[in-house]
Image (cartoon, helix red, strand yellow):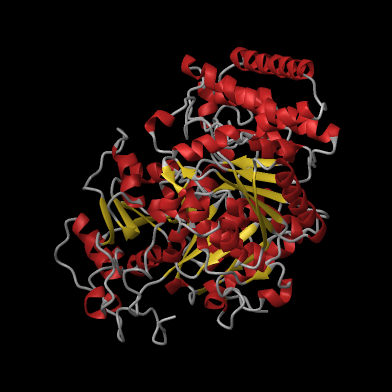
Amino acid sequence: MKNKFTFAEAIKKAIIYSMKKDPKMISYGLGIDDPKGIFGTTTNLHKIFGERRVFDVPTSENALTGIAIGSSIAGSRVLFSHQRFDFSLLSFDQLINNAAKWNYMFGGKTKSPSITIRVVVGKGWGQGPTHSQNFQSLLAHIPGLKVVSPAFPEDAYNLLIDSIFDPNPVIFIEHRWLHGVSGGIKRNKISLGDVHLKQRGKNITILGNSIGLLNVIKVNRFLEKYKIYPEIIDCYSISPINLSKIVKSVKKTKRLLIVDNSNTFCSFSSGVLAELVQMKKINFKSNPVIIGNKNIPSPTSHYISKFFYQDSLSIFKRILKTFGISNYEIPTELKKNKYYHDVPIEKFGPF
Amino acid sequence: MLRNKKLSKRIYFNSLRIRMIELEISKRYHEQKMRCPVHLSVGQEFLPGIIETFFDKNDKSVSGHRAHAHYLSKKCSLKKLIAEIYGKKTGCSGGIGGSMHLIDKSKGFYGSTAIVGNTIPIGAGISLSMSLNKTNKNLTYIFLGDGAVETGIFFETLNFVVLKKLPCLFICENNSFSVYSELRKRQPKNRKISKLVSSFGIKTDSANTTHLNDTFKKFSKAYNYVKKKQMPYFVEFHTSRKLEHCGPNYDDDLNYRDKNFLNYWKKNDPVEKLEKTLLKKKYLSKTEILSFKSKIQGEIIRSFNYAENSKPPKFEDLNQNLFSK
C-alpha cells in the first residue's frame, strides 16, 4: 500500500474521508468536476459521491458563500473551493457580514455556519497582481472566522478534516507550490487554534506556516555551523492562535523571526509581534524580525518578481544578521533554483 | 379573499396588529430606551397580514432590514421582538442583534440582517439543503425590497435558484424608495422588476397591495405553486411606507417623494381600505374594531412591560457565542 501522498492527494483523501463520514455534506466550487479537478484535489469526486453532493457552480462567489451558510444552518455541511484566493474577494460580504457573526449577532439562538472555504494561493509563472494574493492576515483580522494554512501533506489532511467538522466557518489556505510536496499521512485530530512545535531549539524562535515554513526547513541544516539552533513553530492555525506556546518558546530563545506569506504591514506577523512586545517578561537579545512579501502588488514580469517574495536565501541571510554574523558562505542549495526562480519544479504551468 | 368573512377579518386583525405595534415603537422611540435603528413597516402591513394566514412552521423565512412585519407574519413572539429592540437578554437574539437582526427558528424565521440583499442567498442555501434531504413541501420565503434588486447577489442567487429548481418564494416589496432615492433614479423608467426577473426563467407576478383581492390572489397562487411544484416563484408587490426610511418620524416635509405618489397611497392605504370594505360588507362592526384594538393594545402593553422589566445582557455575555461548540 502506498504510504506517501502528495499534498494534493492528501486534500482529496480528506474530502473523501469527510464526505463518507457525513452523508449530508456537500462540496462545490468552480471546476470541481472538470478534467483538472482543482489541481487534482477533487478529480472524480462527483463520480464517487454523485452530482447532487459534488457539483460545479456558476461564477457567483458571493451568492455561493451565502448559499453555503444557508445550507449549513439547515443541516448540510459545506466545503466550497476557490482555485485562487483572489476570486474569493467577491464573497467578503457573506464571509464577514454573515458567516463570521451569524451565531454572535443572533445571540446564540442559531449556530455558526459549519462551512470550510478552501482558497488556493497562486505564485510564479506570471500569476501577477490578481492571481497570487494571500489574504490570510485580512481574514485573521475578523473575529468569528478561523484561518488555517498547513505546510505538510499530513497536516493538510488532518486540518482539512478538522476544519470541515469544526462547527464554525474556516478559511483553509493552500499554497499552490505545496500541491506536489509528498509525505506520509496518519489521521490525528488537530485542535484548530493550536500551533505545532516542529523542532526544539535553543537560541531563536522561528514562526511560519505553509510555504514560508518549508523555506525555513530548507535553511535549517545550514545553521548549526554558526551555532544557531532554531526552535521552529508551525503556525498552521493563525486565527485563533495559541500565543502561549509561542510566548513560552520566545522566553526561552529570546530571539524571534516571523516568516509571513503575505505582505507584512498590518499582518499576521505584525499582529503576533505586537502581542509579544507588549509582554513585559520577554527580554529580546536582538530585535525581533519579520520577513515577508513586499508591501506592493505582485508583479507579473518574471524579471522582477524574483525581488518580491521572501525565500530560503533571504531567510538565511536575515537569521545570520540577527546573530550579528556577517562573515558567511551562501550554501549552493540555497542559491536560486537552477531553472527559474518562479517555479517550484521544472514542469510547472500557468494553470 | 373578501368573500371569505373569517379570512378577511383575520387578515385585517393581523395588519392592524402590525400597524399598532409599529406605531407604538414610533411613539416611544424618543424615550431612548430602544437604542438601535428601526425600519418600521407602517403602510406595508397588508401583505404580511395575508402571509400569516398561510402559516406553516416548516416554511422558512429570511429577510432584510425592514423585517418586523415579516417576523410577525411567522407568528414569532412580540415580547421577544420588543425586548430585542430594547437590547435585553430576553430578546429574540438575546439583545445582541437589535431590530435589524431578528430570528426565531422554532417558527421557521431563520434570520434577518442589515445589509441589503445579503440574506437572499441564505434563503437559497436553506432551500438547497432541504431539497437535497428531500424535505416534502418545502418552501423558503426570501423577502427583499426594490433596492435589493440592484445588487449583484440577487441576480447570482436568482440564477442559482432557477438552475437548481429550488422552491424559493421571492417576495419583493417595492415601495419605490431606497432611503431617499427614488426608483426611477436607480432603474430605467419603463422597466418592471417582475418582467426583468422573469427573463431568468422563473415564474413571476406582480400586484399593487392596495388592490386587496388581487394581492391575496397573487400571493396565494405563488405560495401554492411553490408548495406543489417545488419550483421558485417571484412576486413584486407595490407598496409604500408611511414613515421615514429609518426612525420613528414622518419625513414628508423633506419633499423627496412626489405629492401625487403620497396622495395616492394616502387615499389607498390597504389597511384603511380593508377596514372600510369590511365595515361596508358588514363583516365587521365598529364595536368589533374597538375590541380588536383593545385586545392588540393589551398585548402591546404587556410586551413593552416585559421588555422594560427584562434583564439586560451582562459583561460576561460580551464574549459569548462568537464560535459554536
Q: Which residue is drawn at 68% across and 44% down?
A: B61
* Nearer to the camera, A185 or B260: B260
| Residue B260, placed above or below residue A230 | above
Left or right relative to A111: residue A229 = left
Q: Position of residue A284 (x, y in %)?
A: 25, 43
Q: Position of residue B158 (x, y in %)?
A: 60, 61
Q: Which residue is drawn at 43% across and 31% down?
A: B252
Total number of numbered discs in the rendering:
0
Q: Residue at x 55, y 26 (%)?
A: B317
Q: Residue furthest front?
A: B280
Q: Residue at x 48, y 43 (%)?
A: B177
Q: Position of residue A281 (x, y in %)?
A: 31, 34
> Can residue B236 be seen in this snapshot?
yes
* Nearer to the camera, A266 or B76: B76
Q: Quadrant of residue B99?
A: top right
| Residue B236, placed above or below residue A315 | above
Left or right relative to A302: residue A242 = right
Image quarter hosting the N terminus of chain B: top right
Image quarter hosting the C terminus of chain B: top right
Q: Quadrant of residue B274?
A: top right
> Can residue A107 be seen in this snapshot?
no
* Nearer to the camera, A85 or A292: A85
* Nearer to the camera, B250 or A148: B250
Q: Where is residue B206 in the image (x, y as percent from the top left)?
A: 64, 53
